[in-house]
Image: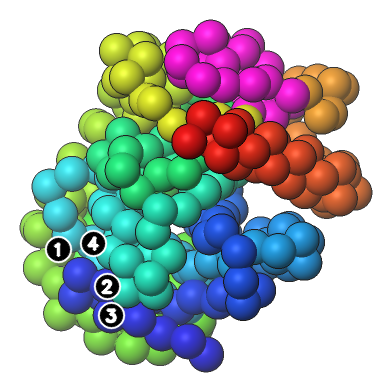
Amino acid sequence: MPLANVRGVTLHYEVFGSKGPWVALSPGGRRAIEGVESLAQRIAQDGHRVLVHDRRNCGQSDVAIEGRESEYEIWADDLHDLLRQLGGLPAWIGGSSSGCRMALLFAMRHPQATRGLLLWRVTGGGAAAKRLAQRYYGQYLPIAKKGGMAAICATEEFGERIRERPGNRERLMKMDPVRFIEVMDNWHRNFLAGADQPVIGASEAELKAVAAPACIVPGNDLSHLRAVADTLGRLLPDAEVHPLITKQYDLDVAPREEWNAREGELAALFLDYMKRVEARATTAA
């Protein structure tokens, strides 16, 4: 199992392919690399090196509840350092949902390291921001206040992190509950601030300043509204929007099986876009 020390945190990763431009893909939610592993393999087969990794606090990587910035800003900087260690910069940065947020932050914070963006199921809107802020952060504040770190370890989410990487229990138990609450509360407030932004995590001005070319595939549920992806496509200076699944669901999250069934089409769409952008860059040079 490949592991890397990234800014003091151990991250689990995999690289598919041995030649060609680098691509980094991240799944939504707090899903492990299995969430994008199959898509990564499809893209690697077409002549790319594709990095997938478990972000901190996900999968088989370390739990690290620390930092003054939003969690997705921390994730973006982690990915930059991991790609640097692997010699993978500049790279195409892609992601779904929370992985999409991280990809956008990567492009904003590390523009010279970004060849382009592959974004699907973009998250935005007040309802999504409030629900997800509670899901990722808010629910743990009263638990830590009442039961301390032992109660946090007993939750479903952190219990899974411990099962995936047993050393996470010791890391959590060594943490001061007051500090845990402080960090989670800050992440919670940062996430809620996205309720009034075009997409969670980025303002209109920040998005208009992103120079990287972007391929956007809209989502189809209440957390990943089609309108949010369309707005992102208008704000980014160099973007294409390609609807893949047009059926809209009045659900927080559309059935994952439908997206899995269309994975081959998603891979083909991204591959075609990357080839066109790379050809354009070659012609311009």
Q: Earlier along the polypeptide chain: callout 4 or callout 1?
A: 4
* Picture quadrant where residue 58 is located: bottom left
Task: Please give the name of the residue rendered at 38% of the width and 70% of the height, measured from the top-left corner.
Answer: 87
What residue range appears in magenta? 216-242
Can you identify the residue that label 3 sits on? 5
* Count of residue discs: 4
Can you identify the residue that label 2 sits on? 6
Can you identify the residue that label 1 sits on? 177
Query: Which amino acid is tagged 2?
Result: Val
> Which label was assigned to residue 198?
none
Left or right of 246 on screen, residue 48: left
Q: Is residue 133 above or below residue 82?
A: above
Residue toward you, 133 or 100: 100
Separation (CA) of disc 4 from disc 1? 11 Å
**Callout 1: 10 Å neighbours few (<14), some, many (20+)?**
many
**Callout 4: 10 Å neighbours few (<14), some, many (20+)?**
some
Q: Choose mark 1 or mark 3, whichever is in front.
A: 3
Q: Earlier along the polypeptide chain: callout 2 or callout 1?
A: 2
Q: Position of residue 31 (x, y in %)?
A: 57, 59
Separation (CA) of disc 4 from disc 3? 16 Å
Q: Choose mark 2 or mark 1, whichever is in front.
A: 2
Separation (CA) of disc 2 from disc 1? 24 Å
Can you identify the residue that label 4 sits on? 65
Q: Is residue 223 magenta?
A: yes
Q: Choose mark 4 or mark 1, whichever is in front.
A: 4
| Dot 3: element | strand
Residue toward you, 33 or 134: 33
Left or right of 1 on screen, residue 225: right
